[in-house]
């Protein structure tokens, strides 16, 4: 039987075909293995990188705490470990598998974002942090043997701060520009990194501004002189508390010294020659702030008080001052927590724990009378406290911790600074240390300020809370801000100087208080209704700077509570409301709702 030629040809080719098929299959599985290996590597390395970045986020918080407390050895150890972790995370996400994956359409989005995060975290910890650690060491060299502040390290630090800020801002922009990602873990990591990096950029910006403010104010280019007002919130004023004791300090190339300590008695019958404008006169002219030191900070805008203080000192002595500072007992407690206690002649120890109580209540128990001799003795005691604490601040304390305490005080408006130099004042405004009144661009504004109307010191017993509620963020959105004031003063047992009623209110009993309460809204808001204890009260709207104001006279008997509510129609906004927080002896509680969607 003859064979078919086609069958023979087919049989002849079968071994070759099987070989090629096996080769193709081998190549296919090799490709699959490579792809699976690459995917597995991306997954595993991504998980490891994520774990390391999670560790870094926690350690960055520890690092900021260590630096703020002046613990530089610990800060350096954390900084080095953080740098190693981020360098490893960056290396893990930089290989060819990650490059290929990151360039895949859609699926590569989370990989691209992850690569951006690790790359910028590496820049932050290996290029920016080492510079900051060098700057932190400035504290070791800034004080000289003769108690002068050596400004040279700060001057040399300025360009390094600027460069560190530039790089940090660049890293922040890169992460902001990255895709938020559809992958939840990457999206979460991106949000967390943005949050941390925003803090770092804010810290750098704040330190850079602080150095730019401190150098000229410490007399970098020549001698400067300042008026320092010590405020007492037992009697409220717009800026915070009534000014009582004051000091004149000078700074010349880092050498700071106090030239004079005085009280309001030194400035009686002294008038500042200042013109603060028609709006200011309409609001406060009847209280004669320019001629009455106790009323000089009746407006919450510290720049007005600072100009009055400068004018008063010049009228009294002929000396010009280059700026002014206001500080309250709570801010002093923050600073004394860093420096340790001060010793007052007579054996009184002033510390972080007792300075507020001693200056706002204790002094009146020591000198309870209202006779001229008692008043003079009490004010001399207060002057001695101011002198002892001021000298203590000059001679002790970690510079980073002092800067942290000063920054906290400024954020709470318990330390305010004014400079007659326009360039420095711009920096102070930018840093929000100037105590200016009014909202930032594009923001709405709300807040209450109380001015004590009795001349007594019962605001030490004043408790307050504020709520803000807005319906929506559109133009004409309705917002209601409610202030609750509670007078916890006892009916008996308080010194006469504390319970005095110089306003002559008929029927007032010991412990009864009276406040002039002013509400501040955005200038372009419409104030529609004012209610006290649920009853509508008549009101007049007066402007102050970029705000609109209404003032209500509130009698507050001992043990009573009063609620004041103001309803306004506000302009459209894309940002949360800016709240004016007046410093008080007892910090005001705040609750807000409705404006968190305005973003």
Image (cartoon, helix red, strand yellow):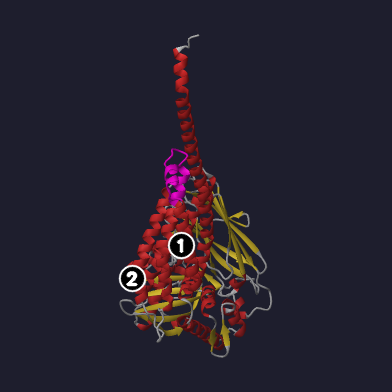
Q: Is residue 100 magenta?
A: yes
Q: What is the magenta range?
A: 93-116
On screen, residue 475 versus residue 222, left or right, reads right
> What crowding class fits label 1: few (fewer than 14 Cα within 10 Å), some (14-19), or many (20 or more)?
many
Q: Which of 411 and 160 lies nearest the eye of the viewer? A: 160
Q: Which residue is mark 1?
A: 83
User: Picture coordinates of residue 171 (x, y %)?
Assistant: 40, 55
- Magenta stretch, main secondary structure class: helix
Viewer can see residue 328? yes
Q: Which of 221 and 124 lies nearest the eye of the viewer? A: 124
> What crowding class fits label 2: few (fewer than 14 Cα within 10 Å), some (14-19), or many (20 or more)?
few
Q: Which of 322 and 52 lies nearest the eye of the viewer? A: 52
Q: Which residue is mark 2?
A: 421
Q: Which residue is the extreme one toward the bottom?
A: 346
- Name the secondary structure under disc 2: loop
Snapshot quadrant of residue 427: bottom left
Snapshot quadrant of residue 466: bottom right
The residue under the point 55% across, 89% down is: 373
């Amino acid at each position: 039987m003859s064979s078919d030629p086609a069958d023979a040809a087919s049989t002849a080719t079968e071994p070759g075909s099987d070989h090629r098929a096996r080769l193709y299959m081998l190549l296919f599985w090799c490709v699959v293995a490579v792809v699976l290996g690459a995917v597995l590597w991306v997954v595993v390395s991504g998980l490891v990188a994520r774990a390391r970045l999670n560790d870094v986020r926690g350690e960055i918080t520890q690092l900021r705490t260590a630096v703020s407390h002046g613990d530089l050895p610990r800060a350096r150890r954390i900084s080095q470990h953080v740098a190693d972790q981020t360098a490893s995370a960056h290396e893990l996400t930089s290989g060819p598998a990650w490059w290929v994956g990151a360039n895949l359409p859609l699926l590569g989005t989370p990989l691209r974002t992850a690569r951006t995060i690790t790359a910028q975290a590496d820049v932050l910890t290996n290029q920016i942090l080492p510079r900051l650690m060098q700057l932190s060491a400035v504290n070791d060299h800034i004080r000289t043997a003769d108690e002068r502040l050596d400004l040279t390290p700060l001057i040399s630090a300025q360009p390094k701060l600027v460069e560190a800020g530039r790089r940090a801002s660049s890293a922040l922009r890169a992460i902001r520009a990255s895709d938020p990602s559809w992958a939840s873990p990457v999206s979460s990591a991106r949000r967390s990194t943005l949050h941390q990096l925003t803090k770092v950029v804010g810290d750098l910006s704040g330190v850079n501004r602080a150095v730019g403010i401190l150098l000229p104010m410490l007399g970098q280019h020549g001698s400067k002189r300042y008026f320092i007002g010590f405020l007492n919130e037992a009697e409220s004023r717009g800026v915070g508390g009534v000014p009582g004791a004051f000091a004149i300090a000078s700074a010349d190339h880092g050498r700071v010294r106090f030239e004079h300590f005085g009280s309001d008695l030194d400035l009686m019958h002294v008038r500042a020659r200042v013109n603060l404008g028609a709006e200011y006169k309409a609001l406060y002219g009847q209280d004669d702030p320019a001629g009455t030191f106790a009323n000089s900070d009746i407006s919450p805008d510290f720049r007005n008080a600072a100009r009055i203080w400068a004018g008063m000192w010049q009228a009294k002595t002929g000396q010009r001052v280059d700026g002014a500072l206001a500080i309250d007992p709570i801010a002093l407690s923050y600073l004394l927590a860093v420096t340790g206690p001060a010793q007052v002649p007579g054996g009184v120890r002033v510390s972080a724990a007792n300075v507020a109580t001693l200056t706002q209540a204790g002094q009146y128990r020591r000198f309870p009378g209202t006779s001229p001799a008692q008043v003079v003795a009490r004010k001399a005691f207060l002057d001695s406290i101011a002198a002892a604490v001021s000298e203590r601040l000059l001679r002790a304390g970690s510079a980073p911790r002092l800067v942290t305490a000063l920054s906290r005080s400024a954020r709470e408006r318990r330390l305010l600074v004014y400079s007659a130099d326009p360039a420095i004042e711009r920096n102070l405004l930018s840093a929000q240390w100037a105590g200016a009144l009014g909202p930032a661009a594009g923001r709405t504004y709300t807040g209450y300020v109380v001015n004590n109307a009795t001349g007594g010191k019962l605001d030490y017993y004043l408790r307050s809370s504020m709520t803000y509620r807005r319906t929506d963020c559109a133009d004409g959105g309705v917002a209601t801000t409610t202030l609750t004031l509670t007078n916890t003063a006892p009916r008996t047992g308080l010194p006469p100087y504390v319970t005095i009623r110089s306003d002559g209110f008929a029927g007032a009993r010991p412990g009864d208080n009276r406040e002039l309460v002013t509400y501040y809204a955005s200038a372009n808001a419409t104030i529609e209704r004012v209610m006290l204890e649920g009853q509508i009260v008549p009101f007049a709207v007066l402007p102050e700077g970029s705000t609109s104001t209404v003032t209500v006279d509130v009698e507050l008997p001992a043990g009573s509570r009063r609620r004041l509510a103001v309803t306004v129609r506000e302009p459209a906004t894309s940002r949360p409301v800016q709240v004016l927080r007046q410093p008080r002896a007892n910090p005001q509680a705040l609750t807000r709702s409705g404006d968190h969607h305005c973003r």
